[in-house]
Amino acid sequence: MSTFRDAAKDGLSKGDLEAVLRQVGVERYHHLHPYHHRMVEGALSKTEMQAWALNRYCYQAMVPRKDAMILARATDPAFRAAWRMRIEDHDGDDGWSGGIARWLHLATSLGLDADSVKSERLALPATRFAVGAYLTFCTDKTLLEAVASSLTEMFSPAIIGERMSAMLARYDYVTEDTLAYFKHRPKQASRDADFALAYVLDHADTAERQQAAIDALVFKCDILWTMLDVLQHAYGEDGNIPPGAFRPEHVQ
Amino acid sequence: MSTFRDAAKDGLSKGDLEAVLRQVGVERYHHLHPYHHRMVEGALSKTEMQAWALNRYCYQAMVPRKDAMILARATDPAFRAAWRMRIEDHDGDDGWSGGIARWLHLATSLGLDADSVKSERLALPATRFAVGAYLTFCTDKTLLEAVASSLTEMFSPAIIGERMSAMLARYDYVTEDTLAYFKHRPKQASRDADFALAYVLDHADTAERQQAAIDALVFKCDILWTMLDVLQHAYGEDGNIPPGAFRPEHVQ
């Protein structure tokens, strides 16, 4: 496994930079994580599935804020107009008719209480720290790095396809209706990833900037990986649920 | 176990607020964590001990920045003069003669490479996210909350005493010299905790502010708890070391 730490040290062609970015996905994306493997094998308990939905909600709810931060830092109106669609996708016309609402629907379909999910109070602290780190990254780093950190969307259509079919086939309490969120995402993610990739390939025009873009994508993979790590630690076989976090008995 | 979420809803006397804050420590401080228990029982592998030192370094290295952020937000010169001592304690006269240097010494005494520890590159991503969340908290929340989040120092002299004697007794590679950091801390921590507690008791003068102070201390306990959770998950029996993080083979 590569660390990708010197991947751009001599400077890369656009084609080679794209190849390195795609390789980050091959080696570091969370489709490799045991929790994901267990999900698609049908091995997650319902509590584990609920905990996944409840914790991932924190991420979904933060994404449009992260995108608004990128919008706020972008000086090119055409860039902003393109990036703005991401916020619309997540919030919808009224805040509760887009991706966040569909994720909330997924969570409540699994038996969770909507207010409890929205409050984020039962999420793992480590989930909140990871989600916060992503927002801080998009606030503090360069615009190029913030955009590059979104490139995990290059890899998401594949994982969503795998996840949807497995969830429908292997968990009798999961229906097409539960998974409405995923029906919309692959098309949006592909459109967003194409735009972000073109931006990164155009703007990463020195070896240093290329390395920064690669590092940003590794960072983002670390965020997603950590979110599954902490679920596995808390809700997997050993059951190390930290104080204050979601427990099965929270579901009536 | 209490969530402490409504602990101050009717307003508390100073004495009762102090009692609630101390109770947060009783129920939520990381002296209750299995990783700490295993450390004091002599059950940690050397890799686990090294991983603990290496990851905890990220926390130590951030603390004076967190304290500088608090300094930057304080308008009272007398408060700043008192709080400034914390930065001096960690950085020393020249940056490398205080607490950070002593923690680095602890890490290198365990066989780790100083540059590698200082680079923080082999730390768990989740450690970085937790440490970053603490800095962000002290940046974004009220000064009262930032001060209250430091009150885990009320509980640290006890855990340090337990840790020091156990490490010396149960790990033959640990010497008095290894643990120089801990020799200085209890006195500093008690002085700092007394000051911070008096500040919180004086300034938490509404039920809402009292609750915010309690929540801040719970948050800080979550940070410390998470740091041990992610060590346990990565380096405990199951060995789920995330991509890019410290592995035993990194030590020559």
Image (cartoon, coloured by chain):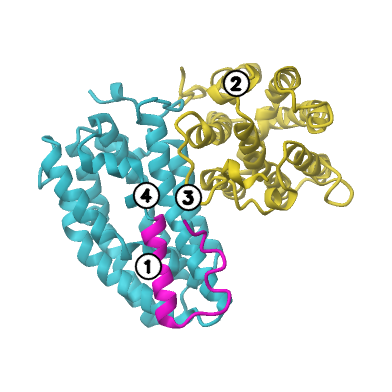
Chain colours: A yellow, B cyan
The alpha-carbon separation of the residues under discs 2 and 3 comes to: 25 Å
Is-magenta flag for residue B16? Answer: yes
The alpha-carbon separation of the residues under discs 3 and 1 comes to: 16 Å
**Numbered badge on residue A243:** 3
Give the secondary structure at mark 1.
helix
The alpha-carbon separation of the residues under discs 3 and 4 comes to: 21 Å
Closer to the N terminus: mark 2 or mark 3? Answer: 2
Q: Is residue A171 left or right of residue A188?
A: left
Which residue lies under the disc numbered 2? A43
Is-magenta flag for residue B117? Answer: no
Neighbour tally class for label 4: few under 14, some 14-19, many 20 plus, Cα within 10 Å:
many
Instruction: Give the number of the mark in front: 4 or 1.
Output: 1
The amino acid type, in three-letter code, at marker 4 is: Tyr
- The chain under label 2 reads A
| Residue A25 drawn at (x, y percent) | 60, 21
Q: Nearer the viewer, residue B166 or A137?
A: B166
Label 4 close to label 1 by CB (< 8 Å): no
Q: Is residue B99 visible?
A: yes
Which residue lies under the disc numbered 1? B22
Q: Which residues are magenta?
A: B1-28
| Residue A102 drawn at (x, y percent) | 80, 39
- The chain under label 1 reads B
Instruction: Give the number of the mark in front: 2 or 4.
Output: 2
- The chain under label 3 reads A
Q: Nearer the viewer, residue A193 or B205?
A: B205
Question: At 70% from the left edge and 51% from the top edge, which residue is drawn?
Answer: A118
The alpha-carbon separation of the residues under discs 2 and 4 comes to: 36 Å
The alpha-carbon separation of the residues under discs 4 and 1 comes to: 23 Å
